[in-house]
Image (cartoon, grey):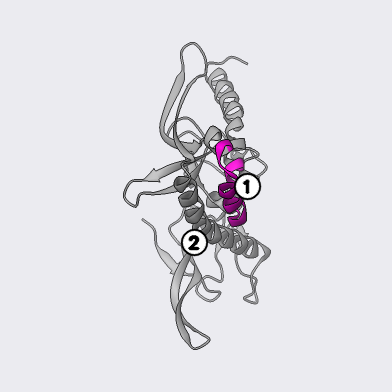
Amino acid sequence: MARYELLNNVAHKDLRVVATRFGREFGDDVGMVPAFATEYAELQREYPLFLQRDHATDEYRSVALLGFEGGENLFLQGGRWNAAYLPGHVAKGPFLIGFQEQWVDGELRNEPVVHVDLDHPRVSFVEGEAVFQPGGGNTPYLDRILTVLHGIHAGVEGGKAMYAAFDAHGLIQPITLDVKFNDEAGANLTGLHGIDRERLAALDADALHALHRAGFLEGAYLLLASTYNIRHLMAAKQQRLRTQAGVA
């Protein structure tokens, strides 16, 4: 059960976060995590990226595939996350953006503020990265987290507009991943969507210019490029199966 509090350097002066270990005890054993448009350039180098449709809101969101089962994260290896880039959803740890009414330039606005989940498994008061310096200032770790949260916030808002534009141009298509790892094991993943390469190539100049001007065309190509990482994910799965079978 989450227990959120508005982060401040008085109540949370001794707060620490276990940020460099990974595993089941921290909730890292998941098959996919949210992916944000602002981190596509980094994510697409290592993770397959897809879209999912939220049937409650009829909106799309993007995800990074980590494994071929619900609780399978093939990037976890002996307490390490075996990738050069850590997805923002994981890197943010127990922190998140909330909103609070504040007076800004004589106007009452909902301004983004940082909250912390004190029941998050990464929260500690005895080990890990300090959040505040002894004098109350931010540590370099907290400054990095603030950058991550800013990217997530911008990615959520920008992503909604981008996916709506993709949908309006008919670029989103359902994808089924039906893969075989060996003669006995395979996986079939449904509910995923991706960019229709042929429809993208067939767009006229006005449509392409509109997507480019909005900054969305690059996102479409990054989503397409990321799908090549499925091969690396399959290789990691095959290696894990061989290890489990006791075969080097």
Kind of residue at badge 2: Leu
Q: Position of residue 66 (x, y in %)?
A: 52, 36
Q: Nearer the viewer, residue 134 or 225?
A: 225
Does 212 appear in magenta?
Answer: yes
Q: Position of residue 189 (x, y in %)?
A: 42, 29
Q: Nearer the viewer, residue 121 or 192?
A: 192
Question: Magenta part of the protein: which range?
Answer: 201-222
Mark 2 crowd level (few <14, some 14–19, many ≥20, 10 Å Cα): many
Q: Nearer the viewer, residue 206 or 94?
A: 206
Q: Position of residue 140 (x, y in %)?
A: 68, 64
202 horizontally vs 170: left or right: right
In the picture of the structure, the residue carrying the numbered disc 2 is 96
Callout 2–callout 1 Cβ contact below 8 Å? no
In the picture of the structure, the residue carrying the numbered disc 1 is 218
Kind of residue at badge 1: Glu
* Residue 230, above or below 169: above
* Residue 109, above or below 158: below
Q: Nearer the viewer, residue 127 or 150?
A: 150
> Looking at the image, is mark 2 or mark 1 earlier in the sequence?
2
Separation of residues labelled 2 and 1 (CA atoms) = 27 Å
178 horizontally vs 43: left or right: left
The answer to whether one can see residue 49 in this image is: yes
Instruction: Say which element carries label 2.
Output: strand
Quarter of the rendering occupied by the C terminus: top right
The answer to whether one can see residue 29 in this image is: no
Mark 1 crowd level (few <14, some 14–19, many ≥20, 10 Å Cα): some
Write the residue at 61% across / 28% down. 232
Write the residue at 50% across / 70% down. 112
Q: Residue furthest top?
A: 183
Question: Label for residue 121?
Answer: none
Predominant SS of the magenta segment: helix
